Amino acid sequence: MAERQTRRIVLYGMTSGMREGLLGLRGILLAAMLGPSAFGVWTLFRIASRYLGIPEFAVRGGLEFEASRAAAQSDETSERKLGRVAVGFLGLLYAPAGAVLLVLSFLVGDPQVRLVLRVLGLSILAERLWFYGLAFLRSTGSLGRFAKVEVSGAGLHLILATVFAVKWGLPGAFGGFILASILSLTLLRPSVPLMPSFSSSLLRGMLRIGTPLGLTTALTLGLQTVDRLVVAALGGIELLGYYAFAGSIAGAAASGVLVVRTVVFPDVYRHAGTVGGARATRRLIEDTIAPFVLVYGALLGLASFAIGPLIQLFVPEYVDVVLPARLLIFAGATTGLSGLASIGLVAVARQRVLPQLAAVAFGFNLVASAWLLHAGFGLTAIA
């Protein structure tokens, strides 16, 4: 069991590493082409789109649990019915939200805010459906298909955003993002149901499980981004651009843990239904979390030493944020590990404690970041 899981983690990890490499390259290229100020606007857009996705987190968490259980029983009909209900929920929520954002864009005077609102309005539904599709593929065990779709979608975003940015700058990067978000949905068919359906009982079941997870994810998102928002509010968009470049390194560190979570969570949820949540969680800790932490910590240490020369070589204008980038590597990995550990709490039906833990961490990050920047300690202290 453990050997088979390790092989799956390694194989999927290579594919996921390629995806993260493509998205990381997009960030580096955009940071270099746009400069810190425009890259700061891009960062605010990405943060805003993630916050708008909070309602989708709730249905996604429930879908992962319910679809994993249906897949364990080889019940493809139930899997696809759950997927269509999730699509119906997202359509009812995000189609009107997109329209509202477009209307708001005509009412604001700031050209940068107007641009961000329009891009959000045009891309929000497609982006949330994309993440739903990935969750469906993960949950139903289609790991090979999931990996191919992930990499193809990342390639689309890299090519379109950077090529358009070369020609039209920040508006071009946004245009490439919109087009890539829409085209990515074609990669999901036919494996993922994209036609909407409605069932109050199925939706309630998904939300009952997923709402605490969604709230936790929202608070974790706040934990990951509140320091950036504080930097933008107190230090300005250009300083945010520098800090966001350092923060993009943390995303790569967290992705390594996400690889493991993607591979193991369907098995944990299936085992919870057969052998009980306690035994499934113990197996998760002994076979996955403990050995992974020992190996991953050493790899992160090596990576933290390597990024300094790489930044100086390829993007020397950001050399001042090498130290914050090194520190944020470990912050990203810790965030990823909390997501991996939360699988065990779901398996034993203790997911309601997660929002409380995330709220404490969020509050500390908010207060500490604001005080440190206000006191003049700089980006390294915030990191």
Image: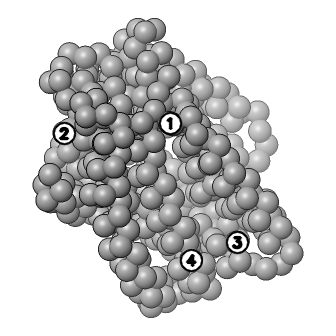
Q: Earlier in the sequence, mark 1 or mark 2?
A: 2
- Quadrant of the rendered structure where residue 219 is? top right
Residue type at mark 4: give it: Leu
Give the percent coordinates (x, y) of residue 362: 68, 53
Q: Secondary structure at mark 2?
A: loop
Distance, label 1 to label 2, CA atoms, is: 27 Å
Distance, label 3 to label 2, CA atoms, is: 40 Å
Say whether residue 65 is left or right of residue 317. Answer: left
Q: Secondary structure at mark 1?
A: loop
Q: Nearer the viewer, residue 61 or 121?
A: 61
- Is 276 situated above or below 342? above
Q: Nearer the viewer, residue 28 or 38?
A: 28
- The residue drawn where x is 46% and y is 65% is 333
- Residue carrying label 3: 382
Q: Earlier in the sequence, mark 3 or mark 2?
A: 2
Residue type at mark 2: give it: Ser
Q: Earlier in the sequence, mark 1 or mark 4?
A: 4
- The residue drawn where x is 43% and y is 9% is 201
- Quadrant of the rendered structure where residue 236 is? bottom right
- Residue carrying label 1: 350
- Residue carrying label 4: 327
Residue type at mark 1: give it: Arg
